Image (cartoon, helix red, strand yellow):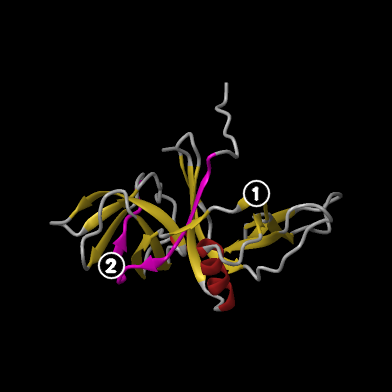
C-alpha cells in the first residue's frame, strides 16, 4: 500500500542567504552525478543551488549534497542520475541557508509543468501527431493568514518587491522533502469573506525543476 502523506505538520522554509559561490569545473554523467569544484568544502546534507551551462537538466535546481571529498574537491548530487544529461560546460554551486520559516500557510495548490507541443503532422496522417516542447514553469500558490507583522511573510514580500529568486523547502512529517528555487509573488494584499479570517496569497513560480527526496 502506498504511504499516505498529509498536509499536516509540514515545515516550509525559504532561503535567507546563499554562501559564496563555488566554481564548478565538472559534473559527471553517472548514476549519481559527481560535482568537481574549487572553493570552500561544503558539508554533507547541505542543500546547494546549481547553476550550469551545457547540462541544462541541473540548471537552477536545488540538490542535497552527499559524500563530500575534501581532498579531491568533489561531492555528489544525492540521488540524481545524470547519465543521460547533456555535457557540462561551466557553472557554480551556492550552499543555501534556509533561515526563513513560513508558518502562516493554510492551503496550497500546484499547477504548471505541462508541455507545450510541436505539431509534426504530415500530409499522410489522418490523426494529428505532436511531440513535447518546453514545459511551463511549475507554480505553488499558498493561501496564508494575513499578518503583515509576521517575519516570514515580511521576508517573502521583500523578495517579491525586489523580484528576487529564493530557494524553498517543503518538509513533510514522513520525511519526504521537495526543494526548488523560484520567484516569489507576495503583495500581502488582504482578502477573504464576511465574518471569516483575513487571508492573503503567496505564489512561488519555479525557475527550474523541483527535486524530490524521500528522506
Start and end of the magenta stretch? 9-30
Q: Estimate the spatial distance between the alpha carbons at disc 1 and disc 2, rounded to whole Å.
A: 43 Å
Q: Residue at x 30, y 71 (%)?
A: 20
Residue with the mark numbered 1: 106
Is residue 17 shown in magenta? yes
Secondary structure type for disc 1: strand
Q: Is residue 170 left or right of residue 25?
A: right
Give yes or no for contact between labels 1 and 2 (Cβ–Cβ under 8 Å).
Answer: no
Report if residue 136 is visible in the image.
no
Number of marks in picture:
2
Most foreground residue, 213 or 77: 213
Give residue 139's quadrant in the image: bottom right
Is 8 placed above or below 120 here? above
Is 130 placed above or below 90 here? above
Q: Quadrant of the C terminus?
A: top left
Q: Residue at x 51, y 68 (%)?
A: 155
Q: Nearer the viewer, mark 1 or mark 2?
A: 1
- Of labels 1 and 2, earlier in sequence is 2
Most foreground residue, 72 or 129: 72
Report if residue 157 is visible in the image.
yes
> What is the x, y in percent for residue 73?
19, 59
Q: Is residue 212 left or right of residue 78?
A: right
> What is the x, y in percent for residue 151?
50, 64
| Residue placed furthest toward the top | 1
Q: Dot 2: few (<14), some (14–19), or many (≥20) neighbours within 10 Å?
A: some
Secondary structure type for disc 2: strand
Residue with the mark numbered 2: 25
> What is the x, y in percent for residue 100?
45, 60
| Residue placed furthest toward the right | 126
Q: Is residue 68 left or right of residue 3?
A: left
Amino acid at each position: 500500500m502506498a504511504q499516505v502523506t498529509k498536509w499536516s505538520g509540514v515545515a516550509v522554509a525559504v532561503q535567507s542567504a546563499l554562501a559564496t559561490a563555488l566554481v564548478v569545473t565538472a559534473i559527471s554523467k553517472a548514476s549519481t552525478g559527481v560535482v568537481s569544484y574549487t572553493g570552500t568544502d561544503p558539508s554533507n546534507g547541505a542543500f546547494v543551488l546549481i547553476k550550469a551551462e551545457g547540462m541544462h537538466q541541473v540548471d537552477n535546481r536545488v540538490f542535497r549534497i552527499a559524500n563530500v571529498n575534501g581532498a579531491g574537491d568533489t561531492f555528489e548530487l544525492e540521488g540524481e542520475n545524470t547519465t543521460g544529461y547533456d555535457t557540462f560546460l561551466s557553472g557554480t554551486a551556492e550552499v543555501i541557508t534556509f533561515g526563513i520559516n513560513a508558518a502562516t500557510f493554510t492551503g496550497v495548490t500546484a499547477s504548471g509543468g505541462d508541455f507545450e507541443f510541436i505539431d509534426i503532422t504530415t500530409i499522410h496522417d489522418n490523426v494529428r501527431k505532436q511531440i513535447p516542447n518546453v514545459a511551463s514553469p511549475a507554480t505553488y500558490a499558498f493561501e496564508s493568514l494575513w499578518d503583515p507583522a509576521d517575519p516570514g511573510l515580511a521576508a517573502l514580500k521583500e523578495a517579491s518587491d525586489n523580484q528576487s529568486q529564493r530557494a524553498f523547502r517543503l518538509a513533510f512529517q514522513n520525511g519526504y522533502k521537495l526543494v526548488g528555487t523560484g520567484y516569489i509573488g507576495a503583495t500581502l494584499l488582504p482578502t477573504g469573506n464576511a465574518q471569516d479570517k483575513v487571508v492573503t496569497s503567496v505564489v512561488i513560480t519555479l525557475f527550474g525543476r523541483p527535486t524530490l527526496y524521500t528522506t
